[in-house]
Image: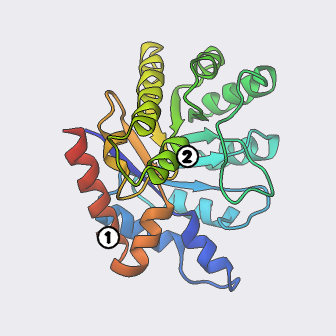
């Protein structure tokens, strides 16, 4: 059964707008859990623009579902992950000027740097994931250094879906879906878990949820945006329903 990991970074974005206490990401995580989330995702960025160190520590002790810790491949973040010990650590590229993650991690070009980090995380009992473009070369490089989960970057698909009038039947959209499907097959053929995420929303999620073998989707901005209007529980329930319908 396909699973949903809810990214609560932008709950913290709203809090940090006033540098205050509300809304509390931990309460958002609890509400997401009640709504049906299978996991919680947070990205502790180098510039601490939203999620803070204390948030991750509190999530580790106050939530009852798995924690996916998005992190740059740096010594600081590896040390922090080994201290907190989330269920999964996902290595992502990170740029200070980007609004959100703009592409997959270049594992192929930095294997010698990333490989020791992967082994340190695994030695700490943490499942290691990598956020990758739908590129077989990058997937194989990740497998070679011990990555256990590949989260395929759905941003290009989401962009084309929007440009093509939200019509999944249009040829450019189908081209992006085929890329994801073929990359997902490579992931599974290597014995790794096939996850996906980035820029998925209530309109474009179902074609991705229907891909063969995809096990988990990580979705944040769309759910937090909907939650402002209907509440976190209902926003999560609605997304989970769409995913489950498509996966069946």
In the rendered view, tell whether residue 91 sits above or below residue 42. above
Are circles 1 and 2 on residues that touch, CB within 8 Å?
no
Q: Residues within 10 Å of mark 1 (few under 14, many from 20)?
A: many
- The secondary element bearing badge 1 is classed as helix
Q: Quadrant of the C terminus?
A: top left
Describe residue 41's horizontal placement relative to residue 93 as left or right.
left
The residue shown at (70%, 26%) is 107
Q: Residues within 10 Å of mark 2 (few under 14, many from 20)?
A: many
- Residue under numbered circle 1: 233
The residue shown at (43%, 79%) is 228
- The secondary element bearing badge 2 is classed as loop
- Residue under numbered circle 2: 86
> Alpha-carbon distance for marks 1 and 2?
23 Å
> Looking at the image, which is closer to me, 113 or 202?
202
Question: How many numbered marks does the figure carry?
Answer: 2
Describe residue 21's horizontal placement relative to residue 107 as left or right.
left
The residue shown at (45%, 37%) is 172
Image coordinates for residue 200, horizontal then vertical, percent: 45, 52
Query: Which quarter of the picture shows residue 64?
Result: bottom left
The answer to whether one can see residue 238 in this image is yes
Q: Quadrant of the N terminus?
A: top left
The residue shown at (32%, 70%) is 233
Image coordinates for residue 45, horizontal then vertical, percent: 72, 56
**Foreground mark, 1 or 2?**
1
């Amino acid at each position: 059964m396909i699973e949903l990991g809810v990214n609560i970074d932008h709950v913290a974005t709203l809090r940090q707008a006033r540098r205050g206490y509300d809304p509390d990401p931990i309460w958002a995580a609890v509400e997401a859990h009640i709504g049906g989330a299978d996991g919680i995702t947070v990205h502790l960025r180098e510039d601490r623009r939203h999620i803070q160190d204390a948030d991750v520590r509190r999530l580790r002790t106050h939530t009852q579902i798995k924690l996916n810790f998005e992190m740059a491949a740096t010594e600081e973040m590896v040390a922090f992950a080994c201290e907190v010990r989330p269920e999964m650590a996902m290595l992502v590229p990170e740029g200070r000027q980007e609004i959100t993650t703009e592409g997959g991690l270049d594992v192929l070009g930095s294997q010698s740097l990333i490989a020791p980090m992967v082994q340190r995380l695994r030695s700490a009992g943490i499942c290691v994931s990598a956020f990758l473009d739908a590129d077989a070369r990058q997937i194989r490089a990740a497998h070679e250094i011990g990555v256990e989960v590949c989260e395929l970057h759905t941003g290009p698909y989401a962009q084309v879906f929007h440009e093509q009038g939200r019509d999944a039947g249009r040829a450019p959209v189908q081209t992006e879906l085929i890329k994801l499907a073929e990359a997902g097959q490579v992931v599974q053929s290597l014995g790794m878990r096939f996850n996906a995420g980035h820029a998925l929303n209530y309109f474009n999620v179902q074609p991705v949820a229907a891909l063969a073998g995809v096990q988990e989707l990580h979705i944040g901005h769309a759910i937090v945006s909907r939650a402002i209007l209907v509440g976190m529980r209902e926003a999560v329930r609605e997304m989970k329903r769409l995913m489950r319908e498509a996966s069946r």
